[in-house]
């Protein structure tokens, strides 16, 4: 290597130009080969069309705290704009969302090459690429079924073709999708956005009405069971209304006790009257077997009359005056006996009536006492069932209040969810995807890259030839390296010396 760099810059530039001129054939060959390869690659590559779209993400109610049904709303501040944008971008990057778009458009339309059987070279390139990525830890090892599944490879290709850019300052998400098909790229973005809005509504949807509805059904069945148990209990115990039933029974109990008291008073009165009549009848006509009887009194009078008549016949016979006096005395006694008999019959009739009334009063007293005893048993049974009845009624009242509360919550949730369902999404499409008019400048970039590479290789070739050549192009470089004075130089003569020039060197 010579020390031509120590020369002045103008001399160095001249040497470089001389080197380039001397290597013009090599430079032309390098440029031609590189450009030919670039043209070949550009021709082989199919141009892609890029469709663009942008979404404006606004802060909505779905990004705030949403309480459970029936709970009070609490202002927790929600998420910031950066978190919201990252979340929305993650939803757009979902493989399931990409798979849905591919299914709707069709693999044969988006990536027809995936359905073709790869050639040996393509298979070798694919296996090599997969081996390199797996060895470098950039991806997990895929099974044969996964690598052979066109849908899996289509999802991976879709993720590579989709570009998502997030602008935190403007809250805008930009979407770019490239595909060899002009209309396919725009259709993919359009379907992606529509399916994204559907998936987003499902993810952010706060649907709690079915849960509250199920809770209402459970409480409703419990309330129906409580109503059935209460009605069954009332039917078995003959209770339509406990308060009214109790009031009626207590009123009946009071009436029966009053009637029993009156019956006892009447019985006492009739018993006293019967005792008095028995005494009167005994004084008037005597008794028969210990019981006053009017017929017995009359028979006694007749017997007394016959006894007196026999005594008159045997003792006072023969005197008219005596007979007349005796007759008159007997008539007066007969009148007295008739009066006593009449009085005895009246007292006897009054006594019989009083005795019959007493028996009727006693029978009525027994009936009233039996009714009162049965009513007291009913009241005691009602008092014993009062606690169970109150428990059933209290349980039914609690379930009824729970049913009303759940129904109110259900109405509120249905109203809220109806409003949320008809509310406009907080994500707006700023720029809808349009069919791109021009393809991506891939071929021009490849040609430009070929030009740049060929120029760099040519320059590298010139520099390599300049710094690593074995001859000197100028005498100044030779004098710099040897420290000797160059007296003369032989110019480049193709016929004699070939492509190089010779230099004569002598000691100074």
Image (cartoon, rainbow, N blue to C red):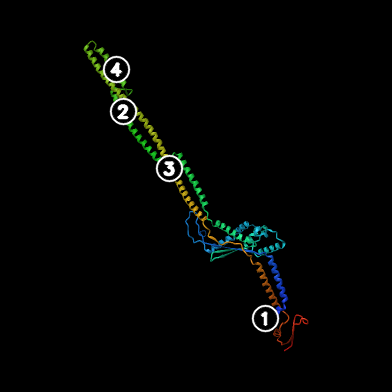
**Residue found at x 68% / y 74%:** 455
Residue under label 3: 386
Given the current orientation, which residue lies at the most extreme bottom position? 508
> CB atoms at circles 3 and 2 under 8 Å apart?
no
Could you give the CA–CA distance between mark 1 and mark 4, rounded to whole angstroms?
194 Å
Residue indicated by mark 4: 302
Instruction: Answer with mark 4 or mark 2, whichever residue precedes in sequence.
Output: 2
* Cα separation between marks 2 and 1: 170 Å
Quarter of the figure with residue 38: bottom right
Task: Look at the image and tell me whether residue 244 can be seen.
Answer: yes
Given the current orientation, which residue lies at the most extreme left position? 321
Vertical placement of residue 258 versus 277, above or below = below
**The one of 366 and 59 positioned closer to us in this rendering:** 59
Nearer the observer: mark 3 or 1; the answer is: 1
Task: Name the residue that disc number 2 marks.
Answer: 275
Kindly identify which numbered label has been placed on residue 445. Answer: none
- Position of the N terminus, as image quadrant, is bottom right
Left or right of 90, for residue 363: left
Q: Residues within 10 Å of mark 3 (few under 14, many from 20)?
A: some
The quarter in which the C terminus is drawn is bottom right
Q: Circle 1 sits on which residue? A: 13
State the image coordinates of residue 119 (x, y, percent, origin top left): 71, 61
Q: Residue at point 44% right, 43% down?
A: 389
In the rendering, at what x and y percent does residue 477 appear? 70, 84
């Amino acid at each position: 290597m010579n020390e031509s760099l120590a020369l002045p810059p103008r001399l160095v530039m001249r040497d470089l130009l001389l080197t380039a001129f001397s290597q013009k054939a090599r430079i032309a060959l390098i440029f031609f080969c590189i450009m030919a390869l670039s043209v070949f690659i550009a021709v082989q590559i199919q141009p892609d069309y890029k469709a663009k779209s942008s979404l404006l993400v606004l802060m909505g109610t779905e990004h705030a705290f949403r309480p459970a049904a029936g709970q009070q709303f609490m202002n927790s501040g929600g998420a910031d704009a950066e978190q919201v944008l990252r979340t929305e971008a993650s939803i757009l990057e979902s493989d399931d969302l990409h798979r849905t778009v591919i299914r709707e458009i069709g693999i044969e339309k988006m990536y027809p090459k995936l359905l073709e059987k790869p050639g040996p070279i393509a298979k070798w390139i694919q296996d090599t690429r997969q081996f390199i990525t797996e060895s470098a830890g950039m991806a997990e090892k895929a099974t044969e079924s996964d690598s052979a599944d066109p849908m899996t490879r289509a999802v991976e290709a879709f993720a590579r073709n989709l570009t998502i850019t997030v602008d935190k300052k403007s809250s805008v998400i930009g979407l770019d999708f490239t595909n060899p098909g002009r209309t396919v790229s725009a259709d993919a973005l359009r379907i992606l956005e529509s399916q994204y809005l559907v998936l987003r509504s499902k993810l952010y949807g706060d649907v709690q009405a079915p849960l509250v509805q199920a809770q209402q059904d459970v409480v409703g069945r419990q309330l129906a069971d409580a109503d059935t148990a209460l009605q069954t209990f009332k039917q078995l115990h003959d209770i339509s209304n406990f308060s009214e039933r109790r009031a009626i029974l207590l009123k009946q109990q009071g009436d029966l006790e009053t009637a029993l008291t009156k019956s006892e008073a009447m019985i006492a009165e009739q018993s006293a009257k019967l005792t008095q009549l028995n005494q009167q009848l005994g004084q008037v006509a005597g008794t028969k077997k210990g019981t006053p009887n009017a017929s017995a009194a009359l028979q006694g009078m007749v017997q007394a009359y016959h006894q007196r008549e026999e005594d008159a016949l045997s003792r006072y016979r023969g005197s008219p005056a005596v007979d007349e006096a005796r007759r008159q005395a007997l008539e007066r006694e007969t009148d007295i006996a008739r009066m006593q008999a009449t009085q005895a019959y009246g007292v006897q009739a009054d006594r019989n009536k009083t005795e019959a009334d007493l028996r009727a009063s006693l029978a009525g007293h027994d009936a009233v006492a039996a009714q009162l005893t049965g009513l007291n048993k009913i009241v005691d049974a009602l008092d014993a069932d009062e606690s169970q009845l109150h428990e059933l009624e209290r349980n039914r009242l609690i379930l009824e209040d729970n049913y009303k509360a759940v129904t109110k919550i259900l109405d509120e949730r249905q109203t809220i969810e109806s409003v949320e369902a008809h509310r406009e999404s907080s994500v707006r499409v700023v720029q809808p995807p349009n069919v791109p008019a021009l393809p991506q400048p891939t071929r021009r970039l490849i040609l430009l890259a070929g030009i740049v590479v060929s120029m760099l290789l040519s320059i590298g070739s010139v520099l390599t030839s300049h710094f690593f050549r074995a001859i000197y192009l100028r005498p100044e470089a030779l004098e710099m390296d040897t420290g000797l004075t160059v007296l003369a130089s032989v110019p480049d003569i193709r016929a004699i010396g070939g492509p190089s020039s010779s230099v004569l060197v002598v000691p100074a």
